[in-house]
Each structure stands twice: as C-alpha cells, then as structure tokens.
Amino acid sequence: RTAPHNFVFLEGVRATLQAAATPEQGLRAMGRIYAGWALSQTFYRRELWRGLGFASLEDFLVRSWEASFMRRDRADLLAQLWTWQNGDISANDLYRGDLKMALSGITAKVLLMPSATDLYFQTDDSRAELPHLRNARLVEIPSVWGHRAGNPLANPEDASFIDAQVEALLDA
C-alpha cells in the first residue's frame, strides 16, 4: 500500500503536470521535482553529479532530469501516478483492506531493501511490514544515491551490495 507521505509527494507531481501552461512545462517541472526526490541530500552536497559528466548542477537538471521526462507522455505519467497512489494488495474481496492479513498471505521469500537515503520508500515503512511477512528479512542499502541506489551504471558499490544480498537470499 502506498504510504501516506508518498501519496502526498505524488499529489504534488500530479498538480504540477495538471497546472502547467503546456505539457512541456509540466514535464520539465516534473523532472526537477524527481531530481530532488530520487537522489539524497548527501548526493547533492558531495556534488556526485560531477562524476556523471555534468559541468554544473543546472546542467545535470536539464540534460539528465528534464531530458528524461521530456521523452515521456503526460497522460501516461498521470496514469502511472494514479496506479502508484492506488496500489494496495489488500484492496480486494479476499483481504477487504486488511494490509496485515494481505502481507501475511505472501509465502515467497522476501528481501526488503530500501536505501538508507530513499525519500520515496523509507526504511520505517519496510520495518512496519516486516513482522507480517512470513519469510522476509530487511537489509538497508548503505547508499547516498537515495531511491536510485544500485540503479546508475556509475554506482558499482551499491550494485555489488545488492547482488550479494540477493545471492544470500537465493542461497538460503
């Protein structure tokens, strides 16, 4: 289920897309909003974007974030926001909104791996779910890359950590 704070973040993104004078302005603004949420404060404080080939913070925002969102379709993004906000494994006749019961119905091995600096999916959210999962463990990724921990190609340290944790899960 989408956490309340995450829901509010998505409402801000939706309002930005809908209030923009043109779809292009909305997409550029969405890119800048995501830039602030997808990476941690430490990432920006250390200016790690420089190691990715950007000459300035503005260059990073324009060529990375704005450019990425300019390739997307506004209507598709609005549909994705709705889907994200309304995602709830307990919203059905079987669980009738009981999230704890829905979580306890998961029998697969689960590895909850939030990044220590993820602003979307906080470790505390995973901690709250953990007691209700039958076969799960929680391992926080010690990363300054925020939500993008392990994702960028320029981040082999996080990728190695994640690979080791997944291997341990599969070997268990």
Image (tube, helix red, strand yellow):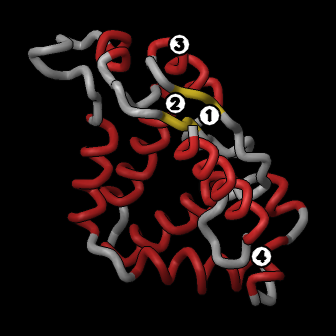
Q: Name the N-terminal-most of marks 1 and 2.
A: 2
Dot 4 and dot 3 residues touching (CB under 8 Å): no
Name the residue that disc number 3 marks: 131
Badge 4 amino acid: Trp
Q: Position of residue 82 (x, y in %)?
A: 26, 45
In the shown orientation, is residue 46 left or right of residue 111?
right
Q: Which residue corresponds to the image point at 54% horizontal and 20% vertical from the top-left?
A: 130
Label for residue 5? 2
Secondary structure of the residue carrying tag 2 is helix
**Mark 4 or mark 1, whichever is nearer to me:** 1
Q: Name the N-terminal-most of marks 3 and 2.
A: 2
Which residue occupies the extreme left position in the image? 93
Dot 1 and dot 2 residues touching (CB under 8 Å): yes
Label for residue 31? none
Secondary structure of the residue carrying tag 3 is helix
Badge 2 amino acid: His
**Mark 1 or mark 2, whichever is nearer to me:** 1
In the shown orientation, is residue 124 left or right of residue 29?
right
**Mark 3 or mark 2, whichever is nearer to me:** 3
Q: Looking at this view, is 25 or 38 the one in front?
A: 38
